[in-house]
Image: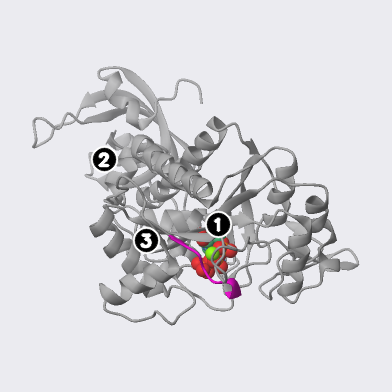
Amino acid sequence: MKNRTLVTALPFHLGQEVTIAGWLHNLRDMKNFGFAILRDRTGLAQVVLEAAHLEQLKGLQLETVIKVIGVVKEKKSKDPNAKEVEVQCVTLEILSPVTDPVPVEIAKPDIDVQLETLLDNRVVTLRHPKQRAIFRVQAALVHGYRAYMERQGFTEIFFPILAGAASEGGAEFFKVNYYDREATLTQSAQLYKQITMGVYEGVYGLSYSFRAEKFATSRHLTEFNQFEFEVGFVDGMGEVMDHAEAVIREQIATVERDCIEELKLLNVTLPPLGAQFPRVTLKEALQLYKDEGGIDETAEPDLSPAAERWLSTEWAPKAHGSGFVFVTSYPEAKAKFYTKPDHDHPGDMFNFDLIGFGSEIISGGLRVNRYDEQIQRIKDKGLNPADFEDYLMMHKYGIPPEGGFGMGLQRLTQNILSLSNIKEATIFPRDVQRLRP
Ligand code: ATP
Ligand code: MG
């Protein structure tokens, strides 16, 4: 729209005539005059209407799309330092009339409905300033990630979603009809990012992952986005963790820089980062949970959700001033076939999770890069190397020592904004029940 002024820019136009456009967020009819709240993508503005304008709005509902030409004036406020502005309407144009009342009230500081109702009415509830803010923060996380990776000289890759066979084994696959065959939706870009190690040495991408999760939890979706990353010619796993830590720091710095208003609106304090994210082995983590958390899970091969929460929201902030903690060396039994064994510590693997302010947000590690060793690992896992022909081709023709990680975009958003359910951090979530809107 030509000559349109956005709401946040109004204070720079004091005394001038401007054109603003947006949605009728709220309306107060005082008979001879009225106050409309106009919402655009940047914020809310009060518009003072005359009786004739109110007449134009007769029979119309909130969310009607309007265009206002008017004069920017200082708003009378109880607080003389407030320096707020409003627009005195001269002409009002209806761009898109709404005649049905909105199904969920969004013209108040918080939408107070159940999560399922919020999502059923996503088309409307997404317009609420706080809902909008969540996905502005999410976009900033992506910008920070991309900026970091580009600065390293890494290459952005767009990975396929449709695949002919289940790449990592397991049952949590969605099958789709593909002409006269069956295809699957990829669980991760593992195979593809590793293949590119033979070319680009450092790659990243924001891919889609699909998991046929059987149960509804507050941390799992059936469709989510994953920041994928892989880097070659590494000396060890520390190098991969260094990238993970640096990229998170940049992502959070980007949110702090670009989302000042959003963070204020959501009333969140971002998790502390500390000087360095602590790095502990799984055994050490379980020992800490026993000694300092008082719960003995030392016989377990993994961290329970409660242990992850304790470690990242209690232990790490207190001991290291950080809401993030790396846990390394998960046992062989839980590791994927592509994970590199730590031959100096038999039974341990070169793998890690980054637990970020509540739960796991990253899984990563070093990969087997030698052909013979990879064939052996596949056999050891009870899988058939013949099913991994494409995968093994890269090893056969040489990939460097390498590693990488996957980080869930929605999981990261959930944790840094302290949202209780991952679906709140997902613009159009899919779960066991939900496929709409
Ligand atoms: P979890 O233990 O949390 O179920 P995972 O270990 O099965 O996750 P990975 O294969 O390691 O998952 O995936 C890498 C990252 O992707 C995870 O660290 C997490 O951030 C995210 N992620 C994994 N599964 C889901 C899911 N179902 N919904 C949303 N994000 C997920
Ligand atoms: Mg994992």
Amino acid at dot 2 = Phe
Compute the Cα span from label 1 to label 3.
Answer: 24 Å
Asked whether the viewer can see residue 27, the reply is no
- For label 1, the residue is 364
Residue 426 lies, in percent from the top left, at 49, 57
Q: Secondary structure at mark 2?
A: strand
Q: Nearer the viewer, residue 146 or 321?
A: 321
Task: Report the disc number at residue 35.
Answer: 2
**Foreground disc of the pair 2, 3:** 3
Question: Residue 239 magenta-drawn?
Answer: no
Task: Report the disc number at residue 419.
Answer: 3
Amino acid at dot 3 = Leu
Q: Nearer the viewer, residue 162 or 312?
A: 312
Ligand 2 sits in which quadrant? bottom right
Residue lying at the far right in this picture: please name it.
Answer: 180
Q: Nearer the viewer, residue 321 or 125?
A: 321
Question: Which residue is depicted at the point 47% across and 43% down?
Answer: 247
Earlier in the chain: of badge 2 and badge 1, it is: 2
Q: Determine crowd level at label 1: few under 14, some 14-19, many 20+ residues with C-alpha closer than 10 A.
A: many
**Foreground disc of the pair 2, 1:** 1
